[in-house]
Amino acid sequence: MQNKLRILLFFGLVIVVNLIFSFIEYSFDLTLDKKHSISNETEQILSSLDDIIFVKVYLDGDFPSEFKHLQSEVKNLLSSFKSIAGSNLNFEFIDPNNLVDEKEKMNLFKQLVKDGLSPTDIEIRTSSSNSNQIIFPSALVYYKDKQRAVNFLKNSITKKPAENINESVESLEFEFITAIYQMLKTHTPKIAFLEGNGELNKDQVYDLSQSVLQDNNSLSYYYQVDHFNIKEFEIDSSTMDADISRQIEKMLSYKVIIIAKPTSPFNNLEKFLIDQYIMHGGKILWLIDAVKGSMDSLQTQNSFIALKNDINLDDQLFKYGVRINANLIEDLRSTKIPIVTGYSNNIPQQSYFYWPYFPLLLSDNNHSISKGLDALKCDFVSSIDTIKNKIKKTILLTSSKQSRINPAPAKVSLGILQDPPPIESYNKSSLPVAVLLKGEFESVFKNRILPKKQSLKFKEKSLETQMIIVSDGDIAKNSVSASGNILPLGYDRFNSYTYAGNKKFIMNAVHYLCDDIGITKLKSKEIKLRLLDKEKIKNNRSLIMLVNIILPLLLLLFCTVIFIKFKNKRYV
């Protein structure tokens, strides 16, 4: 009787516990890389929704297993979002290929592309045939009267398909929550390209700020992009002098200022304005050439002397924590340029050679700015030294492990292709090219004489702020053809190829500097790709079959024998 009562109590307790937990929302992420965990920043944003977010995901239908995996991860993520936002978030999956009428389908495709979605072509294999199909690994997010496109497939040609899918899964939370956060903002943040000292002009940064392809991959999609001339002042009516305080106020209306490839020196007043912008919490993306170098100089001659680009910023950057060295990096990992190697029927014959002054930068850094980037193309780039001070420094981009330094004044000659230096001379490894500085900066004008006749609120130490220094101005420069056509940023005219890493890096850098609540750190989320070793499977096929098929049967047989013996011993 007591045994029966205990059994009833046990089952009753199980039923009660299950009933209690059926009314409680809970989940446990037991994965090593926390792939199913939602960040605090995401929870904060979703909990603050005051209206419905609706997501249309255009990734549904029959496609290969890797895209099924991506679809599943998107569904899991949006389900997690809904568990936080409740009735304020809904979503649906749509198959754009489900339309029977071909004309109607093409109209839908055109509309989706117009809305900012990026299609991709995949191969569908069956036992009887192969066919191609256009799919949209993308989504449209709606909030009130706003709409945002989310393209969540990372498609680098340098990586295997499984790696691209894995990288796409890693960035899903960032891509979706960034789109939602942008729509929740009540005003659009302002950023500015600085002008007045020979910086890149509007056409030369057009693809970065507006996008040649007219898609959402541009700064203007996220920010109000201005061009601010530091030399143009308002006049103080009481003194009839340039109003320095007003100029600083105007600069402080920008969350980030981009100084892209200045070619003429900054005077002390301009340096003071930049310094005080930083001291008041302003953030700067410096894109600085330390040495003057251009392929145009090799059009009529085989060599030129590259001289230091003296723009009078060395002391200022040194005070903040870096020194851009007056040298040129020569790197074995570089792009190719065409060289005339002979003539056939008076027609010049070209061959392509690796040009060490055009290094290809790749990053193995897990920082959200540089993680997972495709190669970046650079022109005549210099090395950066970090200076010991209280500022935290993070190296974002480096040269390859086979680099060397050519100090300025540096002779740049095509002869290096005909008579290449010995491989052993490329003995410098991972020379810094881009550095993130973070902390409370000290003013370079501390203990200096300040501008007279100005009621300035001088700050000698900054608020907590950040800046990024890159030792190449061309990294943000798109080419403009002789006819005025603007080419994509990162386009290599010699190889007819666009290096997407250039634009992605600058976009990531600006997003990071503008990020007030830490969304960009979601980009450093890492999910380990656990692929089966096909070679090991092939070599150990018999052992694997034995372990997975025979061993479980043997264990079952062993347990059965033990159970029978135990039963006979107890009841016989």
Image: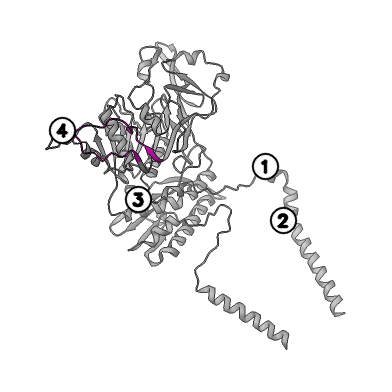
**Which amino acid type is shown beneath numbered disc 4?**
Asp
**Would residue 455 be counted in the magenta stretch?**
yes
- Name the residue that disc number 1 marks: 535
The residues bearing labels 4 and 1 have C-alpha atoms spaced at a distance of: 76 Å
Q: Which residue is mark 4?
A: 241
228 vs 308: above or below: below
Please give the label number shown on residue 548: 2
Comparing marks 4 and 1, which lies closer to the viewer?
Answer: 4
Residue contact between numbered discs 2 and 1, judged by CB atoms under 8 Å: no
Q: Is residue 115 left or right of residue 152?
A: left
* Residue drawn at (28%, 54%) of the image: 186
Q: What residue is at 40 percent from the left and 35 percent from the top?
A: 502
Q: Are marks 3 and 2 in contact (CB under 8 Å)?
A: no
Tell me the kind of residue under disc 2: Asn
Q: Which residue is mark 3?
A: 112
Q: Quadrant of residue 31?
A: bottom right
Q: Which residues are magenta?
A: 439-461
Camera-side residue: 325 or 405?
325
